[in-house]
Amino acid sequence: MFGLNKDNAQGQVTELIERLKSEAELSDEQAGKVIETIKNFVVDKYPMLSGAVNNIFGNK
């Protein structure tokens, strides 16, 4: 999806977490909760994307 392999997607999630920490001044725990909330929102609203979302954000 979007030309991302699993390793690349995980790297981009890590980059997103780092940006949340630096730009929004969030802690590791807060940034992780933001990612989890976004992931759950997308899966709840668009269940047909759950496989792709879980591949990108992890299946927690």
Image (spheres, rainbow, N blue to C red):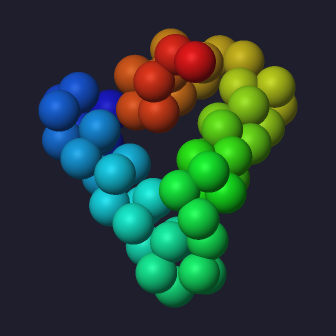
Q: Residue at x 74, y 42 (%)?
A: 37
Instruction: Give the camera-side residue of 2 and 28.
Output: 28
- Quarter in which the N terminus is drawn: top left
Residue in the foreground of this view, choosing between 31 and 55: 31
Query: Relative to 21, is 5 above or below?
Result: above
Q: Position of residue 18 (x, y in %)?
A: 39, 66
Residue that appears at 72% across and 18% down: 47
Is 50 situated above or below 5? above
Q: Position of residue 25 (x, y in %)?
A: 59, 81
Q: Quadrant of residue 4?
A: top left
Q: Is residue 2 visible?
A: yes
Residue 8 position within the rendered picture, expressed as x and y whole percent measured from the top left: 18, 41
Task: Give the x, y percent position of residue 13.
Answer: 38, 48
Above or below — where is 16 with respect to 19? Answer: above
25 w.r.t. 19: above or below: below
Residue positioned 53% across, 56% down in the render: 28
Toward which corner of the image does residue 2 lie, by quadrant?
top left
35 to the left or right of 12:
right
